[in-house]
Amino acid sequence: MEKSAEAKGLELFAPVVDMPIDAGIRRYVLILRSQGIETFESCQGGEGHAFPEPTIKFFGNNGEGFKALAVAMTYHLPVLSVRLVWDFYDGFPHGPWWEMTFRTTDLQSA
């Protein structure tokens, strides 16, 4: 099946990664990256995956989460939550970074 012009254009923003981006979140990642959001991890979620729901992690200052949310809303992505996150390693906080989760995977990838 041939890719649409939109899909071909988004592929210009595909990161160089050691593992392929999950099909169910790939378009979401590429949309965010095409608008300047610096993503660094993603997962389509579900059984056998790193996250229970589709998730994208991205870097940025205190306004970046709102910028990413505006992009997601513009493209009608099914956002569930946006949050600023710190993990703890050996009792010390590590971060922060932003996480955006989605209600569903990308239905266009099915």
Image (cartoon, grey):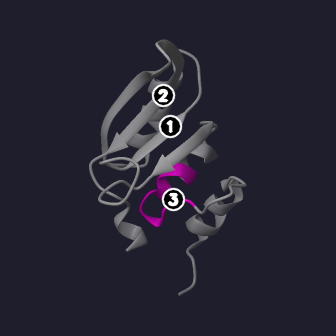
Q: Position of residue 73 (x, y in %)?
A: 38, 40
Name the residue: 27% across, 48% down: 103
Residue type at mark 1: give it. Lys
Please report whichever mark, 1 or 3, sits nearer to the chain's N-terminal start. Answer: 3
Q: Position of residue 43 (x, y in %)?
A: 45, 52
Q: Nearer the viewer, residue 89 or 36?
A: 89
**Tag 1 and tag 2, C-beta contact below 8 Å:** yes
Above or below: residue 95 compared with residue 25: above
Q: How far, Cα to Cα, is label 1 from label 3?
A: 13 Å
SS for dot 1: strand
Name the residue: 49% across, 33% down: 68
| Residue under numbered circle 2 | 98
| Residue under numbered circle 1 | 57
Taking 96 as reference, is 101 left or right?
left
Q: Which residues are magenta?
A: 21-30
Q: How far, Cα to Cα, is label 2 from label 3?
A: 18 Å
Please report whichever mark, 2 or 3, sits nearer to the chain's N-terminal start. Answer: 3
Residue type at mark 2: give it. Trp
Q: Does the magenta-highlighted stretch encompass residue 22?
A: yes
| Residue under numbered circle 3 | 26
Residue found at the far front of this picture: 90
Name the image quarter holding the C terminus. bottom left
Predominant secondary structure in magenta? helix
Mark nearest the camera among 1 and 3 is: 1
